[in-house]
Structure formats: structure tokens, C-alpha cells
């Protein structure tokens, strides 16, 4: 059990620190009943259609550590939102309501909000500044030298 937890933590740290420009999601052929694709850190994401069709948007809270101002934005899952102040573009390509990782594959154990997580890609002035997972139950994720990204809420379709 400790080995599984250690591997899980290492994978999360690696995916949270990824700053690759090639963070585009690519579809990979899979069984017709599943939606599968790869994230920028090459971890496979495998979600059932029930999960992908159930969720509309995520509310992301952004703390600017330089002036301690907080902003919130509702980002459509699979879409983006442009904030004017601070000037950020926030994308939310993937949402997982009950996040779990098994054998290098991220999936959801259920369609309930037991362990919610969202993949966030943030851009400032066109430059990618963050590419990683933000978790609903942990306030220590989504860290950047200037900004802190938090999953505040989720909206069902």
C-alpha cells in the first residue's frame, strides 16, 4: 500500500510540474464505450461516457500572491475562460469527479464528487505558466510562484 501511495504522489508531482508547450490532448483509439486520451505528462486518462457527459463546468479560484487578491471564474470543461485582471486564460480540458490512478491510467471510480480533480492549463500573455491537476479536497495543489489555483465548485449538466 505504501508503494502505491508513493508512486501516486510521485506521478502527481511530476504532472503538476510539467510545463510542456505540447500540452494538447490527443485522442487515442479505444473501446467504443470509453473516452481515452493522453495528458501532457503522457498519463492515460480513461473516463466513461457517463462521467464525461455529466459535468458542465468548474469554478476555479485564483489567488494572486503578490497582492492577495482572489478571482473566480467558471470554466467550461473542455473549454477556456479569459480573465481580464489578472490577465489569464484558464483552460480545463479534463474533469474527474472521483480521481484515482491505476497502472499509469487516471480514471474515476464513480460519478460522485468523492475526490474531484481538474486538469488546468493557465496562460499569461500567451505564455503557458501552469499545467497540472488541481484537487477539490486539497488546498496544496495548483501552486505557481505568483498564483495559486483551487477547485472551488463543479456544475452538473
Image: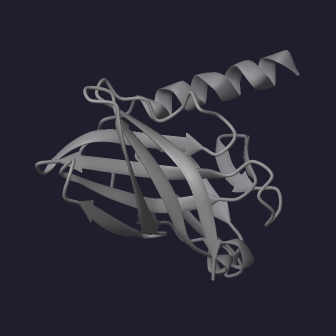
Residue drawn at (83%, 16%), measured in percent from left and top? 2
Question: Could you tell me if residue 111 is visible in this image?
Answer: yes
Picture layout, residue 76 above or below residue 101 = below
Q: Quadrant of residue 50?
A: bottom right
Picture layout, residue 91 above or below residue 104 = below
Residue drawn at (21%, 47%), measured in percent from left and top? 86
Q: Quadrant of residue 136?
A: top right
Residue drawn at (34%, 31%), measured in percent from left and top? 68
Residue 62 spot, x, y in % from top left:
39, 44
Q: Quadrant of the C terminus?
A: bottom right
Q: Is residue 100 left or right of residue 63?
A: right
**Front-most of 27 and 157?**
157
Q: Quadrant of residue 79?
A: bottom left
Residue 35 spot, x, y in % from top left:
61, 72
Picture layout, residue 50 above or below residue 127 = below
Residue 65 spot, x, y in % from top left:
32, 27
Q: Quadrant of the N terminus?
A: top right
Q: Is residue 10 left or right of residue 116?
A: left
Amino acid at each position: 500500500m505504501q508503494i502505491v501511495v508513493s508512486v501516486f504522489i510521485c506521478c502527481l508531482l511530476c504532472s503538476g510540474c510539467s510545463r510542456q508547450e505540447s500540452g494538447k490532448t490527443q485522442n487515442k483509439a479505444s473501446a467504443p464505450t470509453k473516452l481515452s486520451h493522453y495528458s501532457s505528462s503522457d498519463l492515460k486518462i480513461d473516463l466513461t461516457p457517463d462521467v464525461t457527459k455529466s459535468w458542465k463546468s468548474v469554478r476555479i479560484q485564483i489567488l494572486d500572491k503578490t497582492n492577495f487578491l482572489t478571482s473566480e471564474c467558471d470554466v467550461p470543461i473542455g473549454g477556456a475562460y479569459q480573465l481580464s485582471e489578472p490577465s489569464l486564460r484558464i483552460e480545463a480540458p479534463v474533469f474527474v469527479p472521483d480521481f484515482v490512478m491505476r497502472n499509469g491510467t487516471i480514471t474515476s471510480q464513480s460519478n460522485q464528487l468523492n475526490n474531484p480533480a481538474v486538469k488546468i492549463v493557465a496562460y499569461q500573455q500567451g505564455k503557458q505558466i501552469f499545467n497540472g491537476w488541481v484537487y477539490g479536497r486539497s488546498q496544496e495543489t495548483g501552486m505557481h510562484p505568483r498564483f495559486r489555483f483551487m477547485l472551488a465548485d463543479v456544475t452538473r449538466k
